Amino acid sequence: MADFSRPGSLYGAIDLGARKQALDAQTRREATGPQAASSASVVDVTEETFSTDVIDRSMTVPVILDLWSPRAPGSAQLSPVLEKVVGGLGNRAVLAKINVDASPQIAQALRVQAVPTVLAIFQGQAVTGFQQVLPEQEVRRWLDELMGAVEQFYQANPDARPPADGQEEAEGPQEPPADPDLVAAEEAIEQGDLDAAAAAYERLLARVPGNEDAKMGLAGVRLISRTADADPADVQRRLQDPADLDAQLLAADLEMLSGSVDEAFDRIIAVVKRTSGDDRDRARRHLLGLFEALPGEDPSLARARRALSNALF
């Protein structure tokens, strides 16, 4: 049975469409100065700032989530330790403090069952964590292992390593200025205005039909919009009826948001195989829409396109 609330569902849409654009926007803002103060190693995060303060930052440094509650005595013990240990790393890591009582959607998306819970997010993914109060020595050991894994990643992917503080990028061809509609879409996403973001992407596509950033961004915001009011428990219940096409398509959307891309594609391809007429065409078109949420070189696309072709012919 599909699991629509696994870690990653809150930020899956950023991965599927707007993450690259949002990251580029943040990089530009930090480079210009006024937002430089946001690089502090300890930040308070809300549902509105999760994408920027956690997902975007995790593309360059590990972000440690301190999921706490004022009702939990363990939080009062662990939070100061995390602030001390993570703060000691300077800008090599960020501690993101999330009050689960004030931000229940984050807690639900990450399947937090008890507080305090600590998760490490890197490159947009939850990579490790623990769910208990640990002494400072063990927290340091855990963090050292995480930072060691991050260093191994950068050794294997040197082009992904961000420049050190104060280090200038090597001189080379200058990046062209960002398209104003792309910037407008990024700003709208950060403000939670999906309609404005979609309109900006559509304007860009009207001018440059092949722009992949705009295609991915538009598919991503449409995916968020379609699932905004979805009740995962109700979707699971409706999946008991194989003839409920709406439930199958919504389940695939939720799987995409949770990061289960292949599962989402397989679900709709199975629908294509067992349906005909308008239902089959609707499922096919929905799948093609989900394809646009990923970059063209994504390996899942080639696999799914072959499977779709086999299902149709």
Image (spheres, rainbow, N blue to C red):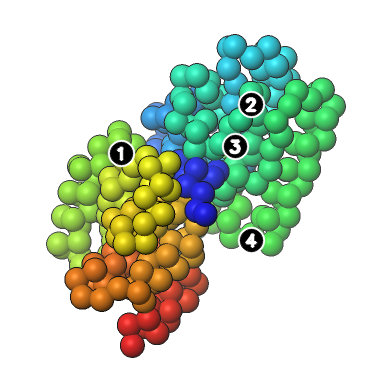
Upstream in sequence: badge 1 or badge 4: 4
Residue identifier under label 3 = 63
Q: Quadrant of residue 269?
A: bottom left
Q: CA distance from mark 3 to mark 2?
A: 20 Å
Q: CA distance from mark 1 to mark 4?
A: 39 Å
- N-term mark: 2 or 1: 2
Q: Mark 3 belongs to which amino acid?
A: Val
Q: The residue tagged with tag 4: helix, strand or loop?
A: loop
Q: Which residue is mark 1?
A: 229
Query: In the displayed structure, would residue 25 be above or below residue 48?
Result: below
Check residue 105 in the rendering and tell me which mark sits there, or answer none.
none
Query: Label 2: few (<14), some or many (≥20) within 10 Å?
Result: some
Secondary structure of the residue carrying numbered label 3:
strand
What residue appears at the point 20 percent right and 43 percent down from the top-left corner? 195
Whether residue 205 is situated above or below residue 47 in the rendered picture:
below
Find disc 2 in the rendering and name its residue: 114
- In the picture of the structure, the residue carrying the numbered disc 4 is 157
